[in-house]
Every structure is written in C-alpha cells, then in structure tokens.
Amino acid sequence: MTTAASRTPAAAPREERQVLTEYLVRQGLKRSAQREAILEAFLKAGQHVSVEDLLRIVKRRDPQVGRTTIYRTLKLFQEAGLASELLLGGEARFEPLWNRAHHDHFFCASCGEIFEFQSPEIERLQDEIAEGIGFTIEGHRHNIFGRCRKCSQKAKPSPSRAR
C-alpha cells in the first residue's frame, strides 16, 4: 500500500511545486511528502476550500495528517504566494492564487456559496478615484455580501391565493 508519506506526489502542477520548493529553501524549511500531498490536494480541490474540506481530502491518502498540519501548510502557501485566504462567517476559506487573474467575490450569507467576478469597469473606477485623491493602490479585495438567487427565492413568501 502506498501512502502520501511514502510516495512523491507528481500531480501538483510543476510551477506551483517549484514556487513552494524555492520558498522553503529561502526560509530554511524542509520539503515533506505531507506538504506536497497537501499542495496537490489543494490545487485539485479547486476554489474556496476550508481547512475541514482539505482535511477530508488529504486524510483519504494519509490518515496521519491532522487539522493543525493542514492549517499551518495553508498559511505557508499564503506566505509563498500560492494561496489567498477569504474569511466568511468566521470560517477561513483558501483559494489558489498563483498565476490567477485578479477577481472579486460575492458571498451568499445564507448558503455560503462564493461567486467570483471580474469587472474592468470597477477596476477603472477604483484607479480613477485613487488617482483623484493621490492614492497609490498596492492591492485590494472587493467582497460583496448578500443572498444568491436560490436563497433569495427561498426567502420570498409564496403568493397567497385569493378565495
């Protein structure tokens, strides 16, 4: 039987693995099979994964991995520029960051769904406003909270029938 601790993961995209390796070397940290397995699972999981989501995925391959290891490794990915953290209702969600276009988020307050969007018009307006006040933008996050279509429809009272 092969476990994540006894094999070398090869499925994580090469560029992200290289970024992680270079970061670990700069920080004087060691590469580990667990970190590699967590990176592979994180990148395969897609968008907006919680520590619990990632823990479930990684534990299938390596039951020895714990919640603290996942959390610390995700923080390490953030420091390396591979991940971004979003806080939603007190829960941290992480998304891959490396080589992704800038985007913003809509958060559904009812079901927790996260929708990404890009708007050149919003970006242009931000730049114009910043220039007008002499502000240099170094980065930003635009998060909008509300209710998605499904949750909005559920919240509407059904029309009553007149008799």
Image (spheres, rainbow, N blue to C red):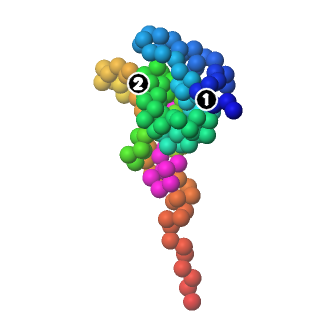
Nearest to the observer: residue 97 or residue 102: 97
Compared to residue 128, the image places residue 159 above or below, namely below
Q: Which residue is mark 1?
A: 4
> Which residue is at the far front?
1
Q: Dot 1: what SS?
A: helix
Q: Which label number is shown at residue 149?
A: none
Q: Find residue 9 and report its horizontal and vertical position in percent.
A: 64, 24
Residue at x 53%, y 21% (from the top left corner): 32
Q: Which residue is mark 2?
A: 139
Q: Residue 158 is drawn in which quadrant?
A: bottom right
Q: Residue at x 51, y 11 (%)?
A: 22
Q: Residues within 10 Å of mark 1 (few under 14, many from 20)?
A: many
Q: State the SS at label 2.
A: loop
* Callout 2 amino acid: Gly
**1 to the left or right of 159:** right
User: Hey, which residue is sitting farthest bottom in the picture?
Assistant: 163
Specify the farthest residue to the right.
Answer: 1
**Picture coordinates of residue 46 (x, y %)?**
60, 36
Check contact, mark 1 vs mark 2: CB within 8 A: no
Residue 115 drawn at (x, y percent): 54, 43
Sequence-wise first label, 1 or 2? 1
Few, some or many residues within 10 Å of mark 2 (<14, 14–19, 20+): few
- Going 51% across and 59% down the picture, which residue do you hit? 152
Q: Which residues are magenta?
A: 102-113
Residue at (63% x, 31% y) in the render: 3
Asked if the magenta segment contains residue 103, the reply would be: yes
